[in-house]
Image: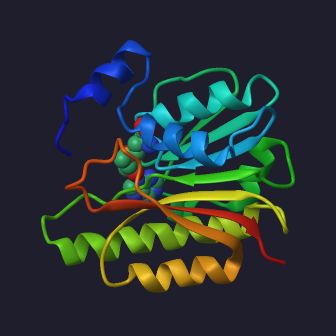
């Protein structure tokens, strides 16, 4: 992935975050207000860890963040549990046990495939990851509540994925944070209120 050394890169360094991508979560949280004190948060595709750092600060000592990634993540803090794994092999019951709860309040996914340069292939792989993240959200969020914030690369299958989210959640919004570069194909879906 190309490293962008812009305003957000320098700001992340100054504020002690591991990646500029933290602002893609912070902007959404400022707008939609879903990271609350005491919340249980599942962060899929969490390395190097800036979203988990931010979530850990927001949920506080009584909250918990479970951070999952293919890559190793350096320790973040006492309320963050790190799991190095492919999410396709992760058991949702184990995640609940690790969180010490019968559900999560928030499921985040900033997962991205290794890009090939072929936009169509990258889009389909991104949709595949987003579908897996959605499955976790459906299994782990409480009926009638919960938040699912998910990155997807734009392309032909996005409308169908958004429609599937609409069938599962009461509210689905498409969000392009200012910190996401205009030329980037990524966009985010903010889903809330899991339907029964
Ligand atoms: C853009 S980075 C995430 C950045 C992170 N949100 C942060 O703020 O530090 C995307 C991550 O998705 C992870 N990823 C991709 N496929 C995955 C999979 N199948 N299981 C777990 N993690 C995956 C990659 O390893 C990569 O670290």
Q: Residue at x 56, y 30 (%)?
A: 54
**Where 104 falls versus 3 (above or below)?**
below
Taking depth in this image into account, of 176 and 14 the one nearest to the observer is 176
Q: Is residue 72 visible?
A: no
Picture layout, residue 170 above or below residue 20: below
Q: Quadrant of residue 129?
A: bottom left
Q: Is residue 181 left or right of residue 102?
A: left
In the picture as drawn, the residue positioned furthest to the top comes out as 14
Q: Position of residue 95 (x, y in %)?
A: 71, 51
- Please report the residue visible at 32 percent of the width from the left and 29 percent of the height from the top: 8
- Specify the farthest residue to the left: 117
Horizontal placement of 18 versus 7: left or right? Answer: right
Q: Is residue 190 visible?
A: yes
Residue at the location (70% across, 73% down)? 169
Q: Is residue 43 above or below residue 4?
A: below
Where does the image place residue 124, in percent across and percent down from the top left? 32, 77
Residue nearest the observer in this picture, 142 or 77: 142
- Most foreground residue, 3 or 9: 9
Give the x, y percent position of residue 9: 29, 27
Task: Name the image colouring.
Answer: rainbow
Quadrant in which residue 156 is drawn: bottom left
Tell how many labels.
0
**Measuring 21% from the left and 60% from the top, which residue is drawn there?**
115
């Amino acid at each position: 992935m190309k490293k962008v050394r812009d305003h957000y890169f320098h700001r992340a360094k100054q504020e002690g975050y591991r990646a500029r991508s933290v602002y893609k979560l912070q902007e959404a949280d400022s707008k939609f207000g879903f990271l609350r004190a005491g919340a249980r948060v599942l962060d899929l595709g969490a390395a190097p860890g800036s979203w988990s750092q931010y979530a850990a600060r927001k949920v506080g000592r009584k909250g918990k963040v479970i951070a999952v990634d293919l890559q190793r993540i350096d320790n973040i803090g006492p309320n963050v549990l790190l799991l190095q794994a492919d999410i396709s092999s992760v058991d949702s019951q184990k995640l609940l046990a690790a969180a010490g709860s019968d559900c999560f309040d928030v499921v985040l996914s900033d997962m991205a495939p290794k890009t090939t340069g072929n936009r169509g292939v990258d889009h389909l792989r991104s949709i595949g990851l987003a579908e897996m993240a959605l499955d976790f959200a459906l299994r782990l969020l409480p009926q009638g509540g919960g938040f699912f914030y998910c990155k997807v690369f734009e392309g032909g299958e996005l409308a169908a994925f958004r429609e599937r989210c609409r069938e599962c959640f009461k509210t689905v919004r498409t969000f392009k944070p200012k910190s996401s570069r205009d030329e980037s194909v990524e966009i985010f879906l903010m889903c809330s209120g899991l339907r029964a």
